[in-house]
Image (cartoon, rainbow, N blue to C red):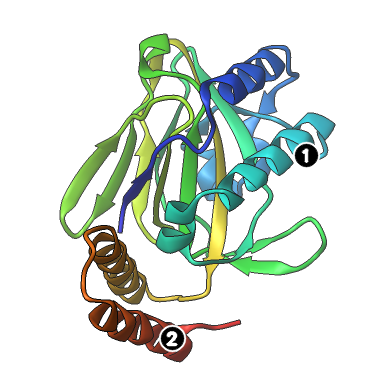
């Protein structure tokens, strides 16, 4: 399930992120992947030990916490501290699948159920750099306005095409969801969206209550905590 989440960051927040990142010390992005990933990855990242990465990552997490749509789509249990990357001068990341289990800064492990890319500059700032996500329905090309995010299953084959002009900046991270199965998350997301539409349209309260009960009972049966 691919879900576009608009305006995780507002224009003022994006401008501050850009100001800080434009002055940042970037390192080779291959430092954070294994031998197979290093063969197809050509980009720059903020070092994991960077105080700027920690500061901006905390701001991203706070912004996500304000987004009901992000919660409904991802049903987050744990989120890997956000990382930041930069693609320029032909930088790209060939087709790959994200690692299944990742280690968090405190030593805990996280199962990557959902991947998220938060775009930090507008498409007019660069050429190329499209995020291509491949699933059973084909290939999906994603390029979003600054401050918007896309969430998608971590099991998806995906790539970032070469950036041929300018620079593409983004934050990226992984989520262990309360609900492991993507199909079950999709059903819960669609049911939640239906409930919200019915509420907004003034639907019968008893019917809305029954659907809400169904949502929580399904979540109760599928959730892992």
- Tell me the residue at 49%/37% (across/down): 118
Q: Is residue 195 above or below residue 104?
A: below
- From the viewer's side, name the closer residue of 73 and 34: 73
List the single residue furthest toward the left. 137
Asked where in the image residue 27 lies, by quadrant, the reply is top right
| Image quadrant where one finds the N terminus | bottom left
Q: Is residue 1 above or below residue 77?
A: above
Asked where in the image residue 126 lies, by quadrant, the reply is top left
Point out residue 105 in the picture as x, y percentages from the top left corner: 79, 55
Left or right: 29 as drawn, with respect to 136: right
Q: Are marks 1 and 2 in contact (CB under 8 Å)?
A: no
- Tell me the residue at 49%/83% (across/down): 223
Q: Is residue 42 above or below residue 182?
A: above
Left or right: 160 as drawn, with respect to 35: left
Residue 222, labelled with which disc?
A: 2
Label 2 sits on a secondary structure element that is helix
Earlier in the chain: of badge 1 and badge 2, it is 1
Label 1 sits on a secondary structure element that is helix
Point out residue 198 in the picture as x, y percentages from the top left corner: 23, 65
Point out residue 106 in the picture as x, y percentages from the top left corner: 82, 61
Residue 148, labelled with which disc?
A: none
- From the viewer's side, name the closer residue of 108 and 54: 54
Asked where in the image residue 218 lies, by quadrant, the reply is bottom left
- Tell me the residue at 23%/81% (across/down): 207
How far is the residue under mark 1 from the one under mark 2? 32 Å
| Image quadrant where one finds the C terminus | bottom right
Q: Which residue is mark 1?
A: 54
- From the viewer's side, name the closer residue of 199 and 31: 199
- Tell me the residue at 78%/35% (across/down): 55
Point out residue 103 in the picture as x, y percentages from the top left corner: 71, 61
């Amino acid at each position: 399930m691919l879900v576009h989440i608009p305006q995780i960051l507002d224009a003022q927040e994006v401008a501050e992120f850009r100001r800080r990142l434009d002055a940042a010390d970037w390192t080779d992005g291959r430092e954070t992947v294994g031998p197979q990933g290093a063969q197809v990855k050509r980009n720059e990242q903020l070092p994991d030990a960077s105080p700027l990465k920690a500061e901006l990552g905390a701001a991203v997490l706070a912004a996500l916490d304000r987004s009901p749509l992000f919660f409904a789509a991802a049903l987050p249990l744990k989120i890997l501290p956000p990382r930041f990357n930069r693609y320029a001068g032909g930088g790209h990341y060939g087709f790959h699948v994200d690692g299944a289990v990742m280690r968090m800064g405190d030593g805990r492990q996280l199962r990557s159920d959902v991947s998220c890319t938060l775009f930090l500059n507008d498409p007019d700032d660069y050429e190329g750099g499209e995020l291509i996500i491949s699933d059973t329905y084909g290939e999906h090309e994603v390029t979003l306005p600054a401050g918007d995010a896309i969430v998608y299953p971590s099991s998806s084959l995906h790539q970032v095409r070469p950036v041929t002009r300018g620079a593409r900046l983004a934050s990226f991270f992984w989520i262990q969801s309360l609900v492991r199965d993507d199909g079950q998350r999709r059903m819960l997301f669609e049911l939640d969206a239906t409930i919200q539409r019915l509420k907004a349209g003034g639907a019968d309260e008893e019917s809305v209550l029954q659907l809400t009960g169904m949502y929580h009972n399904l979540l109760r049966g599928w959730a892992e905590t």
